[in-house]
């Protein structure tokens, strides 16, 4: 029941009027009163509705002036959840901003930065990310956490859901799940959570396609096989498979592996199943892991080691490693000589108790968790993510070693897990993580795969220290730090867009031409990339505004099935399918990408590049690149991240 | 500059940064400039406010430049907004008015020892006071006062009050009753002023003065000093307005105050004796200006500007001010201090927000949960504003909600 009185509505109108009429300098003076009254009105539906009546005037009245909400194009759906739970007037402004977006989406007024379509998209994304607020669960923890902020958010989301279509929200949620699952991340907890919440959003009018898609994902994590569908827990499952016949077991193996390869998600019963057949029916392991001929050969050659690994590491809590194991064998990683002994060492490694604590998991020993993590990393090198940490450099390192230096990676894991230190040489002097403090992420967010949990704290500090030592080099420190950290196969040649001292862009054309001449097969003599190239990019949001610098690696450069030359790259940012604005949308599927790869047409990728390595002895035809292409790239750059930089006039730019 | 001279009213300089004051003066249609700390320069620039950046705590041979700058901008009147800017405004006005004593007078407001002495010499009733340079001075004063009060060995001491010479209101104010209280003092609190305790009901006045004459007198009733007050005073105190007004005229005459607003505090005993506490020449604390505006309907900031300008005519003043009987109701404010060290959330009773006297409050769950240490009565975390027709209901509300824990 509403406890709002006519007086509150009246007071709000008056306060809003005062704010609207106030001069720009005095907005802050009158904003608080509007927010106070808005806070009261947000307590129920009637109040929210009344507020929405003003939503088309919020911006003009100066409600968002001098606040982070001033420019709607800069807002990010992913951040809304956190802000809504904030204290102070932050959360209030956030709610009002959503109402403003709804007013734009509904065409009640026009915003110069955000179209009605943009606003709908934004709100659907917000809803998709926060579906739990729309369908509050009743668990003990959410009950304890519930406060006025959560309640307010619930009311807001109910209101938005009334105005947006629930089916549209479910649809964008499912697209989001598709997008994330297609990238085959090692950490699937976010996807799992989204599947569970999507279930709540199904209504009578949900389309058949969406229903089926949801079912595919839901069964993948809950039970994709006849026997797993019947049971409630692992004990029940174990009892049933013990009495199952050969045909039934074969069917289980087939369906588990089919569901896993289709979604990249592994059902916990799959782990129970694999553990059982590992001992009782080893001949089914190949089917349960979906092994190719190459994978089977690898399996047979190392059968004792693999059985041992399954025994110690594959449990319902670590079931996702089954997918890693499948890929590890199919990629033939065990054929690399140091890998098998390296893995055997990890099985018996004396893990430091402090490291052991961070690896705690339900019913699995720390060694088991570590081996499971190692299997995932070696099997899915492009599935490594940095989580909520600013540690893209470290994640990229683990991914690069998993692909090209697995022996080195296993050595680093062992050192970090046992001795809690890693040492890396930088131009002859040793940098030891033990003697370093800080790093970019001194408080590492722990939602990471086990190998990142073990390694990132060390890699992060070493990287940070190395960069500090490069500060006065007069060039971007990555030139020396990347080869020192990742390995000597990173080329010595290096160029960056900006001058490190002045941040001025003085020769963009030269930068672009050099990249074409060293990386584009049409201009570099037809060479392909041998090792991945760790490059720096400018990350921009959907409105092409600069968000920051970011580390990724170029995996391959190749013409896609339709003949367009593309850059295929690995983005440690948990989501390789981002929209970078100007219609530059990273593709993750359908353009020749392998699992975990993102791709962009060559020129679009170049327009976001910040720095790259190259071999100075292998520069192709710099001048052969068409001027029009260069112009096109420069326009994309100048109109996006380039707005944040000073561009020097280019002497002789017209001479070409 | 010629354009400036054609304007009817002289340009005003607001000394100190206050958006409320800026907004009020902006509505007056008279040219003004804000003199404020450098931190506000960007904001002022962004919003088109004429601004002169000045660091008030740095006094040196360059201080005269402020006058030159303002003079070039055509400023003729300086209005102080904060305790710390009173002498700056005084110095500027003595140059504008070519009267050195304006500055000296402003210094009276900034030195409580000097202020008391001046009041005493003019025959105004004050308590016993002394200037203290050390803890020994405090002990001796405490003893002498209590001896004079004929206290016997073992009787609890009557308290004495210790105040910095130049701080606003209750900042640095300490009540001393025992030797332990004295021990707890730190050396940087000296020198300071010591005063005997004055009994009686405390209240403040806001007197708007032009050419030495009081044009408007507001009486603010303190329900609990530093916590709650309301405007105008209750009928019981308003009844004593003639007595109070005479005392203030006396104060104005003896301090030779000619222009601006003063904010004196008095104690009144049941037998109608007025004791002078202290007087300031700036915008009062406790949101009193907001309360006056709510109760009487005029902007005290605008009034302050008018009264500070010697060129304002009597006619303008008479037109501007309402009669002191014209209040439309009682406007009260309750200043809220958290009662714990850590705050988890805000606790606003529905009953309060739905009370007909409730106007608004400005409290939000703070972003940081640790409560800042308290200095004087400053740093209140929020204010609740009330408005209604009955002074008793007002007093009851203010008393009741002072006990309430707004922060948990």
Image: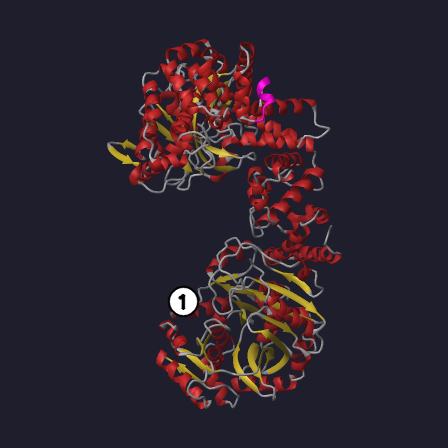
B84 or A485, nearer to the observer: A485
User: Above or below — where is A245 with respect to A596?
Assistant: above
**From the viewer's perspective, is A507 left or right of A248?**
left
Q: Residue furthest left?
A: A428
* Residue drawn 48% across the image and 89% down it: B121
User: Above or below — where is A617 with respect to B308?
Assistant: above
A618 or B342, nearer to the observer: B342
* Residue drawn 53% across the image and 37% down it: A545
B217 or B240, nearer to the observer: B240
State the SS at label 1: loop
Q: Position of residue B48 (x, y in %)?
A: 56, 56
Applied colour scheme: secondary structure
Residue A204 placement: quadrant: top right
Would residue A19 be visible to someone looking at this image?
yes
Residue linked to disc 1: B58
Residue A360 placement: quadrant: top left
Q: Chain of mark 1?
A: B
A384 or B84, nearer to the observer: A384
User: Above or below — where is B397 with respect to B127?
Assistant: above
User: Above or below — where is A48 with respect to A465?
Assistant: below
**From the viewer's perspective, is A6 left or right of A232?**
right
Q: Position of residue A386 (x, y in %)?
A: 45, 33
Q: Position of residue B355 (x, y in %)?
A: 70, 63
* Residue drawn 50% across the image and 19% down it: A273
**From the viewer's perspective, is A158 left or right of A520?**
right
Mark 1 neighbour class, 10 Å CA radius: few under 14, some 14 to 19, many 20 or more: few
The residue stretch that appears in magenta: A225-232
Q: Residue furthest right?
A: A6
Q: Position of residue B267 (x, y in %)?
A: 56, 82
Would residue A405 be visible to someone looking at this image?
no
């Amino acid at each position: 029941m509403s406890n709002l009185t006519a007086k509150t509505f009246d007071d709000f109108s008056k306060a809003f009027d005062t704010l609207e009429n106030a001069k720009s300098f005095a907005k802050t003076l009158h904003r608080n009163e509007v927010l106070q009254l808005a806070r009261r009105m947000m307590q129920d539906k009637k109040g929210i509705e009344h507020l929405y009546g003003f939503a088309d005037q919020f911006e003009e009245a100066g409600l968002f002036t001098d606040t982070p909400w001033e420019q709607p194009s800069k807002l990010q759906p992913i951040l809304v959840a956190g802000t809504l739970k904030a204290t102070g007037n932050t959360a209030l402004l956030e709610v009002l901003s959503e109402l403003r977006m709804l007013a734009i989406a509904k065409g009640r007024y026009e915003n110069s930065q955000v179209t009605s379509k943009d606003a709908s998209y934004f709100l659907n994304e917000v809803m998709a990310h926060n579906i739990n607020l729309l369908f509050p669960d009743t668990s003990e923890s959410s009950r304890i956490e519930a406060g006025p902020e959560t309640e307010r958010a619930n009311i807001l989301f109910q209101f938005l859901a009334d105005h947006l279509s629930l089916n549209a929200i479910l649809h964008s949620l499912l697209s989001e799940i598709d997008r994330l699952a297609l990238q085959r991340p090692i950490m699937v907890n976010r996807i799992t959570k989204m599947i569970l919440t999507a279930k709540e959003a199904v209504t009578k009018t949900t389309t058949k396609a969406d229903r089926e898609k949801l079912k595919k994902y839901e069964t993948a994590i809950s039970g994709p096989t006849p026997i797993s569908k019947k049971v409630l827990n692992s004990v029940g499952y174990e009892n049933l498979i013990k009495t199952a016949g050969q045909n039934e077991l074969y069917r289980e193996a087939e369906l588990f592996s089919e569901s896993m390869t289709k979604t990249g998600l592994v059902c916990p019963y799959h782990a129970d199943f694999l553990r059982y057949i590992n001992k009782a029916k080893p001949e089914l392991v190949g089917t349960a892991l979906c092994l190719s001929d190459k994978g089977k050969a690898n399996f047979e050659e190392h059968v004792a080691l693999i059985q041992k690994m399954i025994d110690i590491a594959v449990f319902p809590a670590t079931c996702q490693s089954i997918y890693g194991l499948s890929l590890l064998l199919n990629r033939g990683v065990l054929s690399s000589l140091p890998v098998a002994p390296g893995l055997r060492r990890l099985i018996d490694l004396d893990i430091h108790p402090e490291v052991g604590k961070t690896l705690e998991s339900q019913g699995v020993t720390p060694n088991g968790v570590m081996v499971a993590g190692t299997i995932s990393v070696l099997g899915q090198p492009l599935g490594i993510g940095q989580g909520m940490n600013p540690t893209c450099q470290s994640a990229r390192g683990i991914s690069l070693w998993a692909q090209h230096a697995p022996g080195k990676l296993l050595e680093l894991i062992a050192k970090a897990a046992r001795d809690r230190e890693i040492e890396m040489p930088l131009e002859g002097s040793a940098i030891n993580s033990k003697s370093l403090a800080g790093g970019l992420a001194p408080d590492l967010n722990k939602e990471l795969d086990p190998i990142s949990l073990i390694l990132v704290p060390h890699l992060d500090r070493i990287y940070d220290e190395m960069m500090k030592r490069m500060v006065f080099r007069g060039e971007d420190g990555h030139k020396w730090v990347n080869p020192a950290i990742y390995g000597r196969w990173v080329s010595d040649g290096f160029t960056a867009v900006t001058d490190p001292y002045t941040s001025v862009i003085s020769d963009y054309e030269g930068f672009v031409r050099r990249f074409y001449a060293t990386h584009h097969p049409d201009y570099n003599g037809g060479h392909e990339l041998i090792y991945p190239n760790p490059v720096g990019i400018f990350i921009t949001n959907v409105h092409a505004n600069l968000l920051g610098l970011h580390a990724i690696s170029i995996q391959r450069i190749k013409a896609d099935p339709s003949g367009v030359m593309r850059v295929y790259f690995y983005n440690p940012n948990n989501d390789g399918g981002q929209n970078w604005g100007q219609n530059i949308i990273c593709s993750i599927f359908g353009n020749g990408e392998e699992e975990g790869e993102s791709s962009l047409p060559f020129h679009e990728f170049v327009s976001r590049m910040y720095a790259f390595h190259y071999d100075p002895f292998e520069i192709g035809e710099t001048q052969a690149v068409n001027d029009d292409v260069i112009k096109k790239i420069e326009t994309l750059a100048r109109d996006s991240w380039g707005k944040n930089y000073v561009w020097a006039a280019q002497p002789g730019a017209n001479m070409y | 500059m010629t354009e400036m001279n054609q304007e009817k009213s002289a340009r005003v300089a607001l000394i100190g940064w206050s958006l409320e004051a800026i907004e009020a003066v902006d509505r007056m249609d008279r040219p003004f400039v804000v003199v404020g700390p450098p931190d506000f320069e960007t904001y002022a620039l962004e919003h088109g406010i004429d601004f002169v950046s000045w660091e008030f705590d740095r006094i040196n041979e360059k201080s005269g430049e402020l006058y030159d700058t303002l003079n070039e901008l055509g400023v003729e009147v300086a209005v102080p907004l904060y305790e710390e800017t009173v002498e700056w405004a005084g110095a500027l006005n003595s140059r504008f008015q070519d009267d050195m004593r304006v500055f000296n007078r402003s210094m009276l407001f900034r030195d409580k020892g000097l202020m008391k002495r001046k009041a005493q010499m003019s025959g105004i009733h004050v308590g016993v006071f002394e200037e203290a340079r050390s803890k020994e001075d405090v002990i001796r004063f405490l003893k002498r006062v209590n001896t004079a009060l004929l206290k016997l060995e073992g009787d609890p001491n009557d308290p004495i009050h210790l105040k910095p010479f130049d701080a606003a209101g209750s900042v640095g104010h300490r009540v001393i009753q025992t030797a332990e209280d004295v021990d707890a003092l730190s050396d940087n609190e000296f020198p300071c002023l010591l005063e005997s305790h004055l009994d009686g009901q405390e209240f403040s006045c806001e007197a708007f003065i032009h050419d030495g004459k009081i044009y408007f007198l507001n009486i603010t009733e303190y329900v609990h000093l530093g916590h709650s007050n309301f405007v105008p005073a209750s009928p019981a105190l308003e009844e004593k307005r003639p007595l109070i007004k005479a005392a203030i005229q006396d104060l104005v005459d003896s301090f030779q105050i000619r222009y601006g607003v003063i904010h004196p505090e008095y104690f009144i005993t049941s037998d109608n004796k007025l004791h002078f506490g202290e007087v300031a020449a700036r915008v009062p604390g406790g949101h009193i200006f907001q309360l006056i505006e709510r109760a009487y309907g005029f902007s005290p900031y605008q009034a302050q500007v008018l009264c500070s300008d010697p060129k304002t005519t009597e006619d303008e003043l008479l037109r501007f001010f309402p009669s002191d009987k014209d209040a439309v109701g009682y406007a009260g404010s309750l200043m809220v201090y958290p009662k714990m060290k850590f705050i988890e959330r805000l606790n606003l009773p529905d009953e309060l927000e739905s009370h007909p006297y409730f106007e608004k409050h400005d409290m939000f769950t703070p972003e940081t949960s640790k409560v800042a240490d308290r200095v004087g009565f400053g740093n209140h975390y929020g204010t609740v504003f009330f408005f209604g027709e009955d002074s008793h209901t007002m007093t009851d509300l203010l008393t009741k909600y002072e006990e309430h824990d707004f922060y948990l």
